Structure formats: C-alpha cells, structure tokens
Amino acid sequence: MKAAMPKATPDAAPCFQVVARSAQTDRFVHTRMPPPAQWPTLRYELPELRALQHAAQCNLVHELLDKAPDSGWGDNTLLRSPNRSLSYRQVRVEVDRRVGVLIQDLRLEPGTRVLLRGGNSIEMALAWLAVVKAGMVAVATMPLLRAKELGEIIAKAQPVLALCDAALLAELQQAQSLHPVLASIVPFNDDTNPQSLSVLAAHHDKPCAPCDTAADDIALLVFTSGTTGSPKAAVASHRDVLAACQAWPRHVLQARPQDIVMGSPPLAFSFGLGGLLIFPMFAGASVFFPDVPYSPQAMAQIIFDTGATICYTAPTFYRQLAPHMQEQAARRGQHSALRLCVSAGEGLPDETRQLWKDATGIELLDGIGATEMFHIFISTMPGQERRGAIGQVVPGYFARVVDEQGHELPRGSVGRLAVQGPTGCRYMDDARQRNYVRDGWNYPGDAFVQDADGYFFYQSRDDDMIITSGYNVGAPEVEGALLHHPAVAECAVIGQPDVERGMLVKAFCVLKPGLVGDAALVQVLQDHVKAHIAPYKYPRAIEFLDHLPRTETGKLQRFKLKQQ
C-alpha cells in the first residue's frame, strides 16, 4: 500500500510517499484513521530521522529488543524486580514465547487489538512487547479504571482479547459482560492457572520472527479523556515510536547502557511507556519495577537500594519524596546514585524544583508532552535551566505561540501552543481531530509565553481538563458520577489550584429539596464517586450552592466558579 502523508507546510521538509507492505490483515484501526487532510504535518528534519522517514517496513520491538545484541548490550539487564532479573537476550526469549501463544494458541491476526490491564511489572512489560512484536495493536489501560471506563474503551477499540493481571480481573470481567466483543480474558501472571499467559508461554521454546509490519502499521492505541469525558484513542505507529526515540531521549535525556531507570507513571500512560520501557531499551539501559505500589518513603528507599540513576514521576510526588531522600542520605551517609530526574504530567512549580535540588543536588528536567504526540516535545536542557520556564523545544520538534487564527505572536505574548515534529495527533474515529490539528499544526491545549531566547513558560490549560498529581481528569466525567447520586440535583466540577497537587478536583453541588450539605454528605458523595470511576478522580473538595451560575440560555459559567 502507499502510506498517505499530509501535505507539508512551506517551512517543513518534504514528506515523501513510501511504498509499504502492511502486515495488518485486521484493518479495523486503519479504516478509522482521520483523512490525510486532517493529519498534522510530520517533519523528519534531523539527519537521524531521515532514514526512518523513508523506511517501508519496521517493527519497533524488533528494532529495540531483537537487535540489542548487535548494539553490544544483549547481556545487559533489561527488566528487574525485587525477585527477578532478565537480560535483553532473556527478555527476547520470554517475549517470543508469548508471541507463540498469541499466534499459535490464540490464533490472533496482525492488527487485532489486545487490551492490557495491569500495573508496572515485568509480566506487564513482556505482554506489551509480545503484542506489538506479533503485529497486533496494544491497548494498555490503567489498573485503577472501573468497569464503566473499561467498557467505553472496549466499545471503541473492539479488542477480542485482554491480557490482565490476575488481581485485577473483577472489573474487567464486569465490563466484558456488557461488551461480548471481548471474547477472551487471559491472566498474564497466574502460575497456578493452566490458561494463563505465563503457563501457556512455557510450552513454547522456539524463536519467533517479528511480524513484518509496515512502518506506518499501528503499534498502539493510547486512550485519553478529553473535556467531554468520552475517551479518545490516539494512534501511534511503529515509525512514530521509533521517531520519538530519536528526539527527546537521544538529544536531551541521553541515557546510558549502565543506567537503572525507575518511576511511578503507569505503562498505560505514554509518559510511563516511554520513560519506563521504550526509552531505556533505546539506550540499552535497565528498568526496575517494584512489587508494591510506590509511596514516597518506599520510593526513596528503593532509589538508594537499587542504585537507580534515572527517575520519572510527577511534581507532586517529587515534593513528597524530597524529605525522604534527605532522610535516606543522612542515614546512609551518602547521596543516591540518581543523576537525572524527569518531571512531567503537570506544571512544575519553581518551589518544587528548588525543594528537590536542595534535597538531592539534582536539577529537575521539566518537560511537556502529549499522549497524542507520544512524549515530550518541550523540555529543560541539562545545564540550560531558567527559573520558571519549562524549557526549550526539543530537537526534531518545532513550537510556536499563536493567536486564535494560528498566527505567531510576538515573543512575550500569551497564546496557544502549536507544535510540529516527527509525531503528531491522529485520533481513531473521532471528530475532535479537527480541534487538535489545524493547518498541519498540533494544538495540545495549553497556553504559553515564549521569551526572546526561545524558553517556553507554561500559563494554563486552555480547556477544562484538570491535571492533578499527573493524572488527567475530565470535569464532565466526575459530574456524571455525582449526578448518579440521588442527593444531587446538579453539579459542576473545576480544577482548583493546589500547592501539593498542582490542581485538585473541586465540585460544586446543588442538592435536591430538603437535603442539607454537611461534612457527612461530602464523605458520602466522595465515596460514591470512587465507587463509580477511578478513585483518583474523586472531588477532594465539595462546596454546596443554592444554584450554579448560568447564562440566560442555561449555559454553565465555569469561569465564575473558578473565580470563587
């Protein structure tokens, strides 16, 4: 087939059509891509991107894992946990065993969507790598999602198989009961279950060739909720992920084979997938996955115990982590082995940056990226920090601050951020593509100022998305959960600035006649929301009002609530 490429803007490098042979016989995602006219302009202007631009066939797991011995790090440790350690060669063996299960036992065809549900673990990583190497489409989901949210993803992605942590089956099985398109759920880590992925994989002992995917064949769908609360599926191809590796990881992070990487972002987030799996593989580095959820105290101890050199987490967590890092250093009589600490997922207050530097001596690498573009495109450059700024545009990307018509504004003006590069937004079957991409530019939905030296200063979101402790929360989704409670007549949800979390979810509720809003009812409503959607989305503050501010036509005036 011919890979359709969008028309280049005058300042972009020419985009050539590449004759590619798609291996994905299941064309579900391909047929639901936006028309080429709605694609962003893809720019491959770095020398290391040009060969990738012209590649017809490639499989990202083959490039990052199978070729590791050719790069000299086949015997390096790739995946490690408190009780297990696997080298690149050993990971390839385990991945191939799971590819055998997917192809030979389950008889899935390339292009089939496979839902993955689990926390950060070696088994989750092996399952993800096997799905993509086999030419299928990985649809990773966060472990905190409830049946309702999982059902929305299943309805849109139409996966026929789910690979699930054995401890997280209940909500997925409930979602499956309402969405029979999900034909099979296979636990990936239950050694007592003869039908689990790990047990089935043990019966396969032959190497598996990677699926001969076209570079533009689909590797993954990453779901993100917009301000409407309905999930959007961002598409990433094998070429996209490999192109992202050649930008921020190569030019800014510059990880080394001897690095040990750890962090808190879930592998279901593009921030976590890149930072805690893809980018370490690109550098021949190692990743540590804990066997318990991270707390600030536990993470500090693990950082010291493992000799971790690179850490990824959100600003809120760095703030909570700082005193425990100081405690560990004082108790052990030395600093940790950390050399790079990456902050993303929400705005980084300068107070937090300085607190971390005082505690560890390390300057945080701030960055902003987007699920739609896979990872970071504006970042602090090591040794080039500027107080209050996120940083500069990452090599390979191009960014500018524009007005509502897309015209670049003078430096120092507040405007909308517009970005181009080797990755860009392509939503699967979603009219919101037109809002994100305009005239070939991606609009992530942020307001920025760029100074005369090219540093970008974050101002705010330009929509109603609430970013709290690194998680994206759509206000309408929380409102929907609250309205399901019989006490609530109407409600509105906003993000309220908060020192610890960046923003916290705040709800304004109008109760039905005869009811009184008190502390007991606040707790009842919070518990109600936690039971219906992911717990991190619940409103940490609830205020009761007699009425909500609205226009004469009945439209909610959120700005008045934010002013309060």
Image: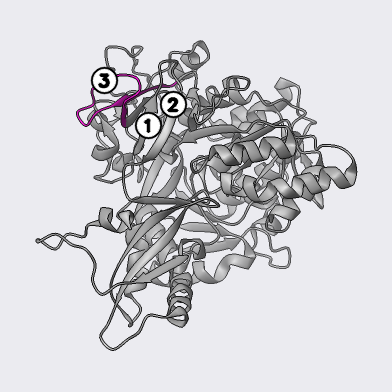
- Say which residue appears at 51% left-offset and 41% top-offset: 270
Classify the position of the C terminus by image quarter: bottom left
Determine which residue is flagged by label 1.
448
Q: Which residues are magenta?
A: 397-415
Q: Is residue 305 left or right of residue 11?
A: right
Q: Is residue 406 visible?
A: yes
Give the mark nearer the N terminus: 1 vs 3.
3
Determine whether label 1 and label 2 are within 8 Å by CB: yes
Q: CA distance from mark 3 to mark 2?
A: 28 Å
Is the Cβ of the residue at disc 3 closer than 8 Å to that at disc 2?
no
> SS of the residue at dot 1?
strand
Q: Is residue 22 above or below residue 359?
A: above
Mark 2 element type: strand
In this view, the mark in front (3 or 2) = 2
Q: Amino acid under label 1?
A: Phe
Instruction: Say whether disc 1 or disc 2 marks the residue closer to the N-terminus.
Output: 1
Point out the residue furthest to the left here. Answer: 552
Residue flagged by tag 2: what amino acid is it?
Answer: Phe
Cα distance in 3D space between marks 1 and 3? 27 Å
